[in-house]
Image (cartoon, rainbow, N blue to C red):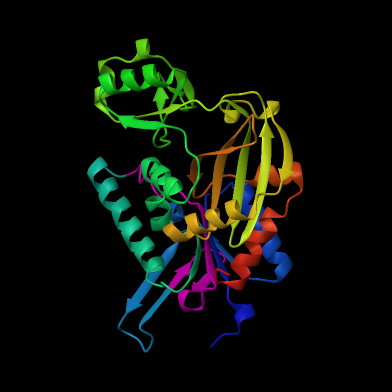
Amino acid sequence: MARTEERPVLVATEADDITADMVITQLNRHGVPVVRLNPADIGTGLTVSTRIGTCPAHVAGQVRTPSRTLDLTRLRSVYWRRPTWPAFEHLSDDDARFAAAQVRYGLGGALYAFEDTLWLNHPLRNAAADYKPAQLAVARRLGFTTPPTLVTNDPDDARRFIEDHGQVIHKTLRWTPYQRDGVPVTGWAEPVTAAEIDESVRVAPHLFQARVDKVADLRVLVVGRRVFAVRIESGLLDWRTDYSALRYSTVCLPGDVERALHAYLDKFGLASGSFDFAVDRAGGLWWLELNPNGQWAWLEEHTGLGMSAAFADLLTRGVTP
């Protein structure tokens, strides 16, 4: 068997990813070999082969890039950061859909076959944890305070909820690339009134949530058993709308909150996650959501917290502590 220190970390992400670069820099400091790939490069830029039951090992496999070859049986861990999948624009629509599916289930299946590997995070577990109604239900069961929330495509239910709670916001259930008249549109959290609800609500479920009377927000990154909490002050309903208006400070969370966050990730089989809270005037925390693969690099730059080092440490160990 190869020595542990020789086993590589696989980093799956798009070509330009500063966050992945930060983690790779830390891995280099550990002397850990790294193989970086992007599924969109399949073809001459990426080759995969997997053998099941045709060799002494139960499962064997290999991925090759122009600069690296990785024996999947020696894989230490996987940082599934922000990969992109091929669009096959040179093919017809039907052929492109067919080819894209084969890549997802071929390359993805080849990697998933090595089930004892540490993933940050496994994409199937990311997907399972990314449903906001389920997130809220789990948060409630673990003792977090959550704002009253309604998910519905019934306009009458939506109007009654808004009338009952007064100040209500609307949030998307899932971020999706979207354009209107050729201009990209992002779904921020926005106030909504009963008068704005019309029959178009019936097209799809919408998320309505009672507005928290907050004084700040909290972004909490959990990596393995390490917790990094950053208080974000802005005066904005949704702080993502203007990063130039943000002020940051680091905070320590109570032990029971940290334990509940770890229990939350354990529930979904995740090794890491980014949690968002609202802080009310009494200092209480209101659980808003989990992003299983959330952004954090800009927080390290502003606070000096060792987030990238924590990722590298966990990937180097290859096991969740």
Please identify the quarter of the rendering in which residue 303 is found. top right
244 sits to left or right of 56: right
Q: Position of residue 294 (x, y in %)?
A: 54, 46
Residue 15 to residue 106: above or below: above
* Front-lying residue, 215 or 126: 215
Residue 196: x and y in percent read: 36, 12
Q: Residue furthest top?
A: 195
Could you tell me if residue 122 is visible in this image? Answer: no
Against 30, is 123 above or below?
A: above
Residue 11 appears in view: yes
Who is closer to the viewer here, 11 or 262? 262
Magenta stretch encompasses residue 175: no
Image coordinates of residue 57 in percent, x first then y, are 38, 86
Q: Which residues are drawn in magenta?
A: 62-90
Q: Is residue 68 above or below residue 73?
A: above
Q: Residue 5 appears in which quarter of the rendering?
A: bottom right
Residue 72 falls inside the magenta stretch:
yes
| Residue under the image location 65 percent in, 36 percent down | 283
Question: Where does the image place residue 185, in percent across and percent down from the top left?
Answer: 46, 25
Residue drawn at point x = 65 percent, y = 57 percent: 23
Which residue is nearer to you in this view: 270 or 74?
270
